[in-house]
Amino acid sequence: MDGANTTFVLISTAMVMLMIPGLGLFYAGLVRAKSALSTVMQCFICMGVVGVVWVLWGYTLAFGESIGGFIGGFNHFALQGVALEGADGDLSPMLFMLFQGMFAAITPALLAGAFAERIKFSAFLVFVVLWSSLVYSPVAHWVWGGGWLGALGALDFAGGNVVHMTSGVGALAAALVIGRRMGFPREPMEPHSIMLVLLGTGMLWFGWFGFNGGSALAADGIAVNAFVTTNTAAAAGALTWMLITWRFGGKPSAIGAASGAVAGLVAITPGAGFVEPLPALLIGIVAAIVSYAAIEFRIRRQLDDSLDVWGIHGMSGTWGALAVGLFASTALSDGGVFTGNSGQFVSQLIATVATWVYAFIVTWILFKLVDVVMKVRVSEADEAIGLDASQHGEQEGGAV
């Protein structure tokens, strides 16, 4: 194996893993104090649940021998046939499996923000197993595992469709099924720790270099381009959202800057290795505007997507996927609309519509099924005292 490439992807894998507790801190700071621990725990336990599911059957459903371009077969069940050593200098298949497993783990953790403060932990565990197996793995196969979207020519460098669109659109379905928090929107539900939000954002921004850069699967120029475009889009998104809040709210919002950074990171994910730095700047700016507008729409409609997973991940992920069809560079791919390849935009549009429809419908069905079997939502009494005490018997300062 190539030592430099192996080391680079090993480090990138660890960086993506660090994004999961970073996401937990980001989300925990946004919720009320009485449910902060439960919010972190939902993110944290995804590493455990998906870590097991991925090894046993998740990886083979995503990257096994294709069955009709829709799902992988069971030829890699329990990692059967996944070699430690790559052939002729190729990356280790086992390392590739683990790198992809971190993507699989963070995706349902992202979705958890939609129903923060009101879901049973037991129901969440069951939902994560089902959703990871029946939504994440199939879409990963479509795009990266030899499935029909990859054959169509759709591009997704690091997970615009596979990670952010599935979680964001799934969040919309989940929020509709589970309903609003008690008191929403009449009672204020302010973030309890903006410092945690900023700390989590910093960890996410750092980890995203591994998320996007590592998706080159080699320490090469494509990885360097992904590092640069990732940072550029994040910076542009942070500044844009902060300026929007300054203009319309009278003060530059710290949460706004953090949200804009995440929106920029989400939007550049599908194109990090396919677009150049200047288009990445525009992608980050537009992502902040699109997600801000989506959240304003969500508020007006009184939809309780608690932590705006749909507005940020769903909408910025959608914009980023379509932006690849516009701005893809001929130096890095076959190009996009602005380099004379309009067919790439058509492929991106088809992939976007397919991902939206599939993720929404299947997430809706899974939530309904789990609710019938074991009831998804906590009782009003448990929600009133907070999920830290009612679901875990723990809270900051000691056991309940």
Image (cartoon, rainbow, N blue to C red):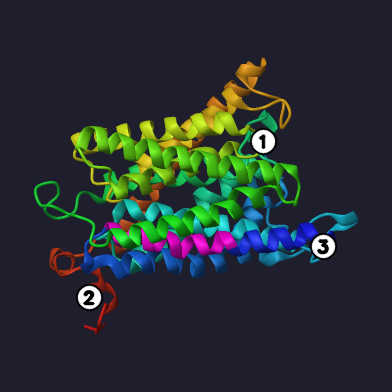
Q: Nearer the viewer, residue 272 or 45?
A: 272
In this picture, is 226 found above or below 379? above
* Secondary element at image label 2: helix
Disc 1: which residue: 150
**On the image, numbered disc 2 is attached to which residue?**
389
**Left or right: 254 with respect to 363?**
left
Real-space Cα separation, disc 2 to disc 1, in angstroms? 46 Å
Residue located farthest toward the left when viewing the structure as drawn? 186
| Residue type, mark 3 in image | Gly
Residue positioned 22% across, 49% down in the render: 179
Which residue occupies the foreground of this view, 161 or 334?
334
- Residue 3 is tagged as 3
Report x, y in % for residue 364. Answer: 36, 45
In percent of width and height, residue 298 lies at 25, 37
Q: Where does the magenta region start and end? A: 15-30
Numbered label tally: 3
